Amino acid sequence: MPIVRHLYPGSNTSRGFFSYYDQILPSAKARRVFILKGGPGVGKSTLMRRAGALLEQAFDVEYLHCSSDPDSLDGICAPALGFLMLDGTSPHVVDPLVPGAVDGIVNLGVCLNESAMHVQAPRIMRLQADISRCFARAYRYLAAASAVRSDSSALLEQATDRTRLDALFRPALQALFAEPPRFAAGQERKMFAGAITPQGCLHTLDTLGATQLWRIQGPWGIPSQWALERLRAQLLWQGQTVESYFCPVDPTRLEHLYCPANGLLITTDSPYHSYTEHTARILDWQECLDINLISAQSERLELNHQLFETLLATAVSCLKQAKQLHDQLETVYIQYMDYEALDAMGESVLSRIRSLMQR
């Protein structure tokens, strides 16, 4: 049976909207890339879902969700087929790299009655400005939340006994790297397995395909990226394919590793992305901490955690406001869409996908 996975190629973060779109499908492996253009509500997600349902009949499919509306899609990918369909509009503008031969634009906006909707221009611009302000506020709150968590991480780093940490991870390293290295460079793919959305903090770890799970657990804010970065470096040196999943708050902070070859997921436990199925090993950071130092700084750690929760919840509230405004924007566009023309365009695209699947 084809495997269906759900990922986030981009996320709302402390650095604004952050994208790993260039990691979805290596250009050397791409056979056909459709880049969808058009305003909100013109049917991009609907077409992608139809394409996904078709591809699922024969290929593993990745549904790439939108962090600003997780019920919508930013893309569909069938890696084995070399197929990718993307929403190429702001904030993740994408244009063809090899026009015609590999990728091309499908402009669903041609199904809009543009002359009739010209009267809506002032309203559209007001909504766009209000939406941008909501996102800007959300990003400021996420930046503050990231700074607060960094303070706790710095304290926990100070309190970590590196000798104990080495002893904790040594059996895991020995189990993971028992095989001799391959004489080939490992491959890394970067992505998000969760996002900060108008619905709160969501994750899709359960769809990655893991058959065994190692969980790094400990107090909130543990600097687990140290261990994960070491594991990643070793895996790549071994010649393995590695999927690196990053934190939506800080998109450069490694949070999970997945090794497709053996189905191993190494995850950082958190209330925001808790996943326990297939647990084979628990790596408890608590065992490596100076309890006296942690006890002396308990009020600081608790305050940071409370501040983080408040700032994160406020950011989510801002994203909810942006989503409500975006829904209003979609209603403007929907009333000017020619859905018969849209269906005809969709059928033409699906026909091209069927031809690709049969080659």
Image: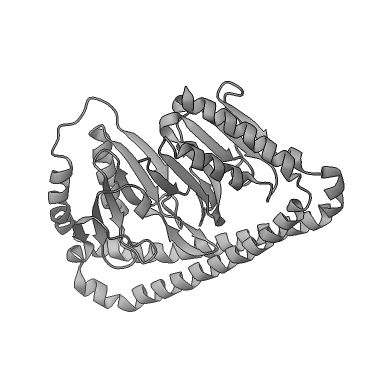
Give residue 31's position: percent from left, percent from top.
49, 25
Taking the image as drawn, is residue 345 in sight? yes
Give residue 288's position: percent from left, percent from top.
18, 63
**Residue in the foreground of this view, choosing between 258 and 234:** 258
What residue is rendered at 51% in x and 50% in y?
Answer: 65
Give residue 16's position: percent from left, percent from top.
55, 53
Question: In which quarter of the view is residue 149 placed?
Answer: bottom left
The number of callouts visible is 0
Taking the image as drawn, is residue 21 in sight? no
Give residue 55's position: percent from left, percent from top.
47, 37
What residue is rendered at 35% in x and 42% in y?
Answer: 243
Question: In which quarter of the view is residue 341 placed?
Answer: top right
What residue is rendered at 53% in x and 42% in y?
Answer: 75
Query: Is 39 positioned to the left or the right of 352 in the image?
Result: right
**Residue in the foreground of this view, choosing between 13 and 281:** 281
Query: Is 139 positioned to the left or the right of 82 in the image?
Result: right
Depicted 26 relative to depicted 320: above or below: above
What residue is rendered at 21% in x and 28% in y?
Answer: 182
Query: Is 227 positioned to the left or the right of 10 in the image?
Result: left
* Colour treatment of the image: one colour
- Assign the N terminus to one quadrant of the image: top left
Query: Is 121 positioned to the left or the right of 139 in the image?
Result: right
Depicted 259 relative to depicted 159: above or below: above
